[in-house]
Image (tube, rainbow, N blue to C red):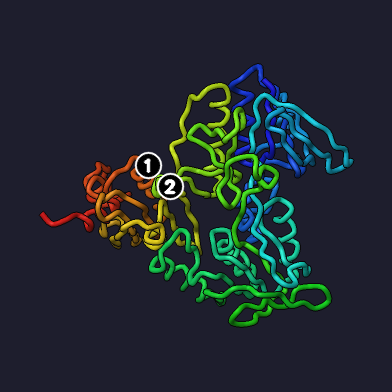
Amino acid sequence: MKVIVVGCTHAGTAAILNTVNLYKDAKVTVYERNDNISFLSCGIALYVEGIVRDVNGFFYCSPEKLAELGVTTRMRHDVTDVDFDAKKIRAKNLVTGEEFDDTYDKLIITSGSWPIQPKIENSGLENILLCKNFAHAKEIVAKTKDARRVAVVGAGYIGTELIEAFEVQGKEVIVVDMERQILPKYLDSDFVEEPTRLFAERGVKFALGESVKSFKGEGGKVSAIVTDKGEYEADLVILCIGFRPNTDIFRGKLDMLPNGAIEVDEYMHTSRPDVFAAGDAATVWNNVKRAHDYIPLATNAVRMGMLVARNLKSDTTRYLGTQATSGIKIYGLCIASTGLSEESAVKSGLDAQSVTFSDNYRPEFMPTFDQVKVKLVYERGSRRILGAQMMSKTDLTPAINTISVCIQNGMTVDDLAFVDFFFQPHFNKPWNFLNSVAHLALPPV
C-alpha cells in the first residue's frame, strides 16, 4: 500500500506514525514545504517570554525519526497539483526547482493552515511579522530584542498569550482587534473583565472594536499602525488575525467549506475515494452546533491524524467530534472553556441561557483556598449543555474536560447537577463546583 502524505505538522505526523505502526505493507512518502515537522506553535509565547529558552524543545518528531521508521521524507518539497482520477501528484523540489510526479494508493491531506493576511496598505514593511511556525518564532524573538513598542493585531489565544509575553519583557504593548473584547471566540464579555484588568494594570493599551487600515513606516520599517479610529506608534507588529486552510490546490476538486476547509466524514474520508484529510486543512464535526465547522486546534489535528491511519483500509474508528476545549494562563489566572460561549450560541441561532457560580473551591477551614468562577451555557428547551467557562488562581482547568465529555454525550444541566464527584477537603467541597453551577439552572419543583 503506497501512501502519500501532503504536509507534516500535527495531523500529518500523527497519521504517519500510526500508519507505519498499523500496516507493515505501507510505503509512506511525506511531502513537506519546510525543513522541519511537528512544531508546537502554541509554545511561541513561552519562548518570547523566556519561560522556555530552547525552541528546539517544541518539536516532538523529526524527519530523521521518520526516516528511521522507513518513511521517505521529502522535506522542502511542495505538492503543486493532484490528479485524483489517475491517483497522481505533482511535486516540486524547492531547493533544486526539479518537478516530478508520484503515485499513490491512499492520499492523506494534512497541509495545515496559514495565518490570515488581509490586504493592508504598507503591510510589506519590515518588522510586521506572522506567528505560526519555527521560522516565525525565531524571527519574533530576534526582533523583540530591539523593539520598544509592540502592536499585537488579533486578541485570540495566540495574540493574548503574546500580550503577556511582550509585557513581561518590558515592552509597551498595544492590542488591536475588530471585536470589543479579548478572546471573543472562547469567553463571554463578562468573563474577560478580570484578565483585561490584569493587562491594564500592567500598562497594556487596548484598541478594541477597531479595524487596521494601514501601516506607516520610517526607513523601510514599521513605525505606526493606523486604524479606523486612531493611530498608534509601534516598531514591531505581530499579526494574529486567525488562520485559513492551506488547500488552494484542491479547490474545485474536493468538497469544501467556503473558507477552503476540506469536508470529511466521520471516518476522515473526503469526497474522493482513497483520499483523506485531517487537521487544520479539514472540517471538524462540532458537537454543539451539530454541524461541520472549522476549528484549527492541535488537539483536533492529532486525533484526526490518528483516525485517518486507523481508517485507511476500512472504516474502523469513528470521529466523535469536538467541543473546541481549550485553556490559557494569564498572569497566574487559569482560564478554560469548552463548547460555545453564550454570545456565540445566540449568534449560532441557539436559544441559549446561562448561569454563573462563584465560590471558594474548597472548605474555608483549609490553610488556603481560592475562588473559582464557572459559567454554564445551556439550551432553553432541551436543557442540553452547550458550553462552559471557568477561571481560578488555582489550576482547576482539568474540570473543563469533564464538561467537554458532558457535551459530547449530550448531557443536560439537570444531569450535571447530580453527577457523582468525590469529596475530599484538599480538593473540593461536598458539592463540587460543577454540581453547584448546574444547581442554579434547576427548575423549581
Residue 415 versus residue 198: which sits nearer the camera? 415
Q: Where is residue 35 in the image (x, y as percent from the top left)?
A: 77, 42
> Residue 356, position in %: x, y?
30, 62
In depth, the one of 361 and 157 nearer the eye is 157
Tag 2: amino acid: Gln
* Secondary structure of residue under mark 1: helix
Q: Quadrant of residue 100?
A: top right
Specify few, some or many for label 1: CA neighbours under 10 Å numbering under 14, 14-19, or 20 or more.
Answer: some
Residue 26 vertical position relative to residue 198 in the rendered view, above or below: above
- Location of residue 295 in the rendering, given as x and y in whole percent from the top left corner: 52, 49
| Disc 2 to disc 1: CB gap under 8 Å | yes
Does 345 sit left or right of 120 as displayed? left
Residue 58 in the figure: left or right of residue 304: right
Residue on which the image places disc 1 = 408
Seen at 66% across and 31% down, the residue is 107
Name the residue carrying label 2. 323
The local secondary structure at tag 2 comes to loop
Q: Residue at x 71, y 61 (%)?
A: 140
Question: How far apart are the alpha carbons under marks 2 and 1?
Answer: 7 Å
